[in-house]
Each structure stands twice: as C-alpha cells, then as structure tokens.
Amino acid sequence: MSGISDRHQEIKRRRHRRKKLAHFSKRLKKATASEKSTIAEKIRALTPGCETIISNWKLVDR
C-alpha cells in the first residue's frame, strides 16, 4: 500500500480539528476581545463548519 487511504486521512483530519478546537475553547476562557477575534479567524481557517462553532461559542459577528 502506498500512502494513507482517504477514509483514514479524513479521520486524521477530524481528530486534529477536534484537538485544536479543544485547545481554542480552553484559551477562550481567559481571552481578551482581540484574542477572541484571532481565535475566530483561526477557527474559520481550520474547519468548514466554522460559523456554527463561532455562533455556539458566542464569538464575533462578522
């Protein structure tokens, strides 16, 4: 076998996103307003379901 199958690749991406989102949610508790907007931008770059997450976490309105 050469490389990783598409399914395993997507599972790896999902796990990475979940880990990063957990990290951001921890940092969010002490974040200032500018840090919150930075976190929101990073979430937008990280995942396709970003707007749902941002609205659930009550971050910035674009």
Image (cartoon, helix red, strand yellow):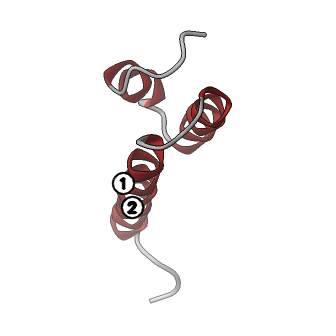
**Residue drawn 39% across the image and 59% down it:** 10
Q: Residue furthest top?
A: 62
Query: What amino acid does circle 1 point to?
Result: Ala
- Residue 24: x and y in percent read 46, 49
Q: Are marks 1 and 2 in contact (CB under 8 Å)?
A: yes
Q: CA distance from mark 1 to mark 2?
A: 5 Å
Q: Dividing the image into 4 quarters, which one contains the C terminus?
A: top right
Quadrant location of residue 6?
Answer: bottom left
Residue type at numbered disc 2? Lys
Which residue shows up at 63% across the image and 37% down it? 35
Position of 6 with respect to 41 (left or right) is left
> Does residue 46 appear left or right of residue 13 in this picture?
right
Count of numbered labels shown in the rendering: 2
Along the viewing direction, whichever of 45 and 35 lies nearer the viewer: 35
Q: Quadrant of the N terminus?
A: bottom left
Residue at 45% of width from left, 21% of height from top?
51
Q: Quadrant of residue 38?
A: top right
Q: Which element type, helix, strand or loop, lies under badge 1? A: helix
* Residue at mark 2: 19
The residue drawn where x is 46% and y is 30% is 50
The residue that mark 1 highlights is 22
x and y percentages locating residue 2 in the rendered image: 52, 86
State left or right for residue 10 relative to residue 39: left
Residue 4 placed where, x, y %?
Answer: 45, 77
